[in-house]
Amino acid sequence: MTTTTHNAARRPFGAITLGLAVVAGSLGTLAGCRGERSDKPPHQFFPDLDDQMKWKPQSGSEFFANGRTMRQPVAGTVAFGRTSLLFDEPWGETYMSQRAGLLREDDAFYRGVDETGAYLVRMPIAPSRAMVERGMQRFNIYCSACHGYEGDGKGTVGVRWSYAPANFYDPKYRDEKVNTGRDGYIFHVARNGVIGGDGKQKMPGYAHAVNEQDAWAIVSYIRALQVSRLATIDDVPSTEREILERQRAAATPSTTTADASTPTATNGGAK
Ligand code: HEC
């Protein structure tokens, strides 16, 4: 105790000099960091944090024979746990909430193809009302900008796009003898987009936003859109038919909205 007091008393000047040096030093450091450009290498206060031994994703490596830093899982690795997908509906549960969702071994569900690699004519899950409604919602979010809310290819972006988007009422999107008419192909396009023969991307893929389950839901909705223009009232179940007929009766009065079949309506009924 006495020693300390004695030292402090004997070297007041040294302590002040040290304090000044610390203050000046930190000011200098701050000034050096603050938006100053410098050609000198930056100060490294903790070099081991700046310069770590690590491999960056996608970078090359001389260590491994194939030159890649990123490694494949060991052969025979078994996936477990749930998928990270946020959406689970009863109609897709078999695939999305179990190991199947991680292994993705089911070509029909994950790629829309059969064992020979041909596009499936019909989707591998039985559509339900919930599925079609989900499909409508996803279609309206991701596809309608180009293909239009009705799927006729006349969306706000679509009419200005470098390539004309498909009109889903074109018979080739219903004819199962050609790929374009098959559920599996529409599923594939929803997720991967379209690359033309010239190698140009005509339609972007939506796999980042539309998972397999949602892509099938969208396919079911595109089918529903097609049916909506081609079906007759006789195709509608009797319970729903009554509702439709009531709506039609309510909408028919002479001053209705513009309708192609009643040309007088397009000029406001003026003669
Ligand atoms: C940015 C605009 C754009 C969006 C958004 C878009 N498409 Fe397309 N789509 C196109 C264009 C353009 C074509 C025509 C490509 C061609 O000429 O073959 C096309 C074609 C298609 C075809 C027919 C492919 C063929 O070979 O004939 C399908 C099916 C399709 N789109 C489905 C979808 C679905 C499902 C979505 C929503 C997930 C979607 N598209 C979103 C632009 C778009």
Image (tube, rainbow, N blue to C red):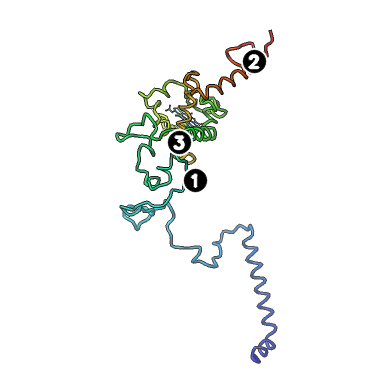
Asked which quadrant contains residue 171, the reply is top left
Q: State yes or no: discs 3 and 1 in contact (Cβ < 8 Å).
A: no
- The one nearer the camera, 17 or 134, is 134
Q: Measuring 68% from the left and 14% from the top, which residue is drawn there? A: 268
Question: Viewed as shown, does residue 68 lie left or right of 7?
Answer: left
Q: CA gap, disc 2 to disc 1?
A: 46 Å
* Dot in front, 3 or 1: 1
Q: Quick check: is the Cβ at mark 3 less than 8 Å away from ligand 1?
A: yes
Q: Residue at x 64, y 64 (%)?
A: 30
Percent position of residue 13, x then y: 69, 83
Residue 54 locus on image (x, y percent)? 43, 60
Mark 1 within 8 Å of ligand 1, using the beta carbon? no
Q: CA distance from mark 3 to mark 1?
A: 15 Å
Q: Earlier in the sequence, mark 3 or mark 1?
A: 1
Q: For the residue carrying disc 3, how many other residues have a C-alpha within 10 Å: few (<14), some (14-19), or many (20+)?
A: many
Where is mark 1, residue-wise? 86
Q: Amino acid at mark 1?
A: Leu
The type of residue carrying mark 3 is Ala
SS of the residue under disc 1: loop
Q: Which residue is mark 3?
A: 215
Mark nearer the viewer, 2 or 3:
2
| Residue depicted at 55% across the width and 22% down the height | 242
Instruction: Kindly indicate the quadrant of the structure image that contains residue 3.
Output: bottom right
Q: Is residue 89 above or below residue 168?
A: below
Percent position of residue 216, x then y: 44, 35
Q: Which residue is mark 2?
A: 253
